[in-house]
Amino acid sequence: MFKSGFITIIGRPNVGKSTLLNTVVGQKIAGVSDKAQTTRNKITFIYTESDFQAVFLDTPGIQDPKNKLGDYMLKTSKDTLSEVDVITYMVDTSKSPGRVDKNILKMLTALNHKTPVILLINKIDTIVKEELLALIENYSAMDLFDEIIPISALENDGVAHYLDTLKTYLPEGPQYYPEDLVTDQPEKFVVSELIREKALRFLSEEVPHGVAVAIESMKWREDKAICDVEATIYVERDSHKAIVIGKGGKMLKKIGTAARREIELLLDIQVNLRLWVKVEKNWREKDLKLKNFGYE
């Protein structure tokens, strides 16, 4: 009997959803940083064993929208709740449930146990056992979760137990994707996410939310094992463009060097990466620009 199904991963920003799924598939697909909005799209991760296949939907962190991009991200996260066989709600040990978490709990309550919900308590490597047990007891009292599993996505602790548990809740079904496929996203999308992740990681707090990356071209040379990648980093203000470029181009070079290393690991080939920076004022409020940047 082969089991398969779709699982959404929801939670507030920065609880470790993308870190978990990168760990599950053993490859960097989604950007990871300590900035909110690192994940903006619904990204599909595929994990396959001999007797089951789990198709994960990594969603943007749920938060109050402040612009059309935020509206898109919130809708993306909410829509997955009705599309899947299992819901995984992820929290971490760093904060008590706040307003955003309470809104998520309301969404889960409204489902009335129609879909199995697994709670993952992430970052258990940062607290002592007694605190963890108290957290588990508090969440158990809510009577919302079919399973509660403590993990450390960064340390790959508890992840195997999570996958084994998932298998018990997935229905009998087909293998939707080839066994060697870990995402259905095109390479251009993953490359753009890796570049944007480095921008988020290195830039000051006021810039990242207004950063988008467009891959202008990806070309494999016929005479050498090299891939030429040309990409544009878009920002919303002239002052942000200056910050991204940096004095003497140092910041842009720093972003490009770090991104190139991970793109080479992804493509398994030497990469020649060229970056430009352009200003597109208020792109997060423009429907056409959101569509052009892949937020549809």
Image: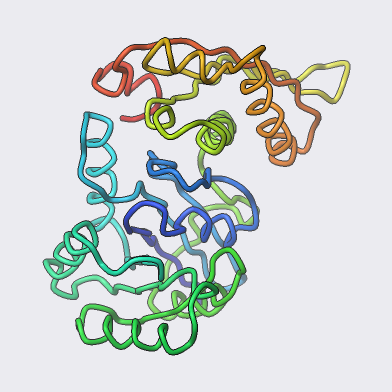
Vertical relation: 273 (above or below) 10: above
Hey, which quadrant is residue 97 in on the image? bottom left
Hey, which quadrant is residue 81 in on the image? bottom left
Quadrant location, the C terminus: top left
Q: Position of residue 210 (x, y in %)?
A: 38, 26
Vertical relation: 25 (above or below) 71: below
Residue depicted at 72% across the width and 18% down the height: 228
Q: Position of residue 60 (x, y in %)?
A: 35, 46
Count up the numbered dots. Answer: 0
Q: Position of residue 90 (x, y in %)?
A: 37, 65
Residue depicted at 44% across the width and 45% down the height: 43
Q: Tell whether 271 sits left or right of 286.
A: right
Q: Where is residue 110 in the image (x, y as percent from the top left)?
A: 11, 66
Which one is nearer the viewer's eye here, 212 or 22? 212
Vertical relation: 186 (above or below) 147: above
Q: Tell whether 223 sits left or right of 134.
A: right
Residue depicted at 51% across the width and 46% down the height: 33
